[in-house]
Image: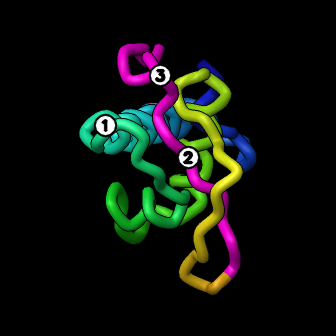
């Protein structure tokens, strides 16, 4: 699986360890949402954020988790778009066939 935490702030030590754990847990939350939904259910990153997170977690965390799970072959990005909270279109994701059976490392 791709890296869940992207160390753009150059964290080290315990702070880095905690950030990595939190990001991995976020991917698990997103995966659980897709696994618990009926097969073929589509979610945009904003919809994932609304269902899995709350402030102070930034909305970009939902986008990162969707991208990580897509790169791992668990989710697939579709050509279907929905308007996001600011009225801009966002692509939707869905669980790939068998994707719910894969385990994150």
Does 74 sit left or right of 88 as displayed?
Answer: left
Secondary element type, mark 2: strand
The percent position of residue 62, horizontal first and vertical second, equals 52, 53
Would you name the residue on which mark 2 appears?
93
* Mark 3 touches mark 2? (CB < 8 Å): no
Q: Quadrant of residue 51?
A: bottom left
Residue at 56%, 43% (x, y): give it.
Answer: 66
Would you name the residue on which mark 1 appears?
32
Q: Is residue 100 magenta?
A: yes
Would you name the residue on which mark 3 appears?
97
The percent position of residue 8, horizontal first and vertical second, equals 74, 46
Secondary element type, mark 1: helix
Q: What label does residue 9 carry, if any? A: none
Give the vertical position of 18 relative to 58 (above or below): above
* Mark 3 touches mark 1? (CB < 8 Å): no
Report if residue 18 is visible in the image. no
Residue found at the far bottom of this picture: 86
Magenta-colored span: 88-105
Q: Is residue 13 magenta?
A: no
The percent position of residue 69, horizontal first and vertical second, equals 55, 32
The percent position of residue 26, horizontal first and vertical second, equals 42, 42
Q: Quadrant of residue 89?
A: bottom right
Alpha carbon separation for disc pair 2 and 1: 14 Å
- Counting every numbered tag in the picture gives 3
Pick the front one: 39 or 45: 39
Foreground tag (3 vs 2) = 3
Pick the front one: 86 or 93: 93
Which corner quadrant holds the N terminus?
top right
Foreground tag (3 vs 1) = 3
Foreground tag (2 vs 1) = 2
């Amino acid at each position: 699986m791709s890296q869940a935490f992207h160390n753009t702030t150059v964290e080290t030590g315990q702070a880095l360890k905690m950030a990595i754990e939190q990001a991995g847990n976020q991917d698990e939350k997103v995966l659980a949402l897709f696994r618990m939904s009926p097969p073929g259910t589509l979610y945009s990153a904003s919809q994932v954020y609304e269902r899995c997170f709350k402030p102070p977690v930034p909305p970009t965390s939902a986008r990162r988790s969707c991208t990580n799970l897509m790169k791992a072959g668990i989710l697939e990005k579709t050509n279907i778009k929905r308007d996001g909270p600011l009225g801009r279109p966002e692509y939707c994701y869905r669980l790939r066939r068998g994707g719910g059976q894969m385990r994150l490392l």
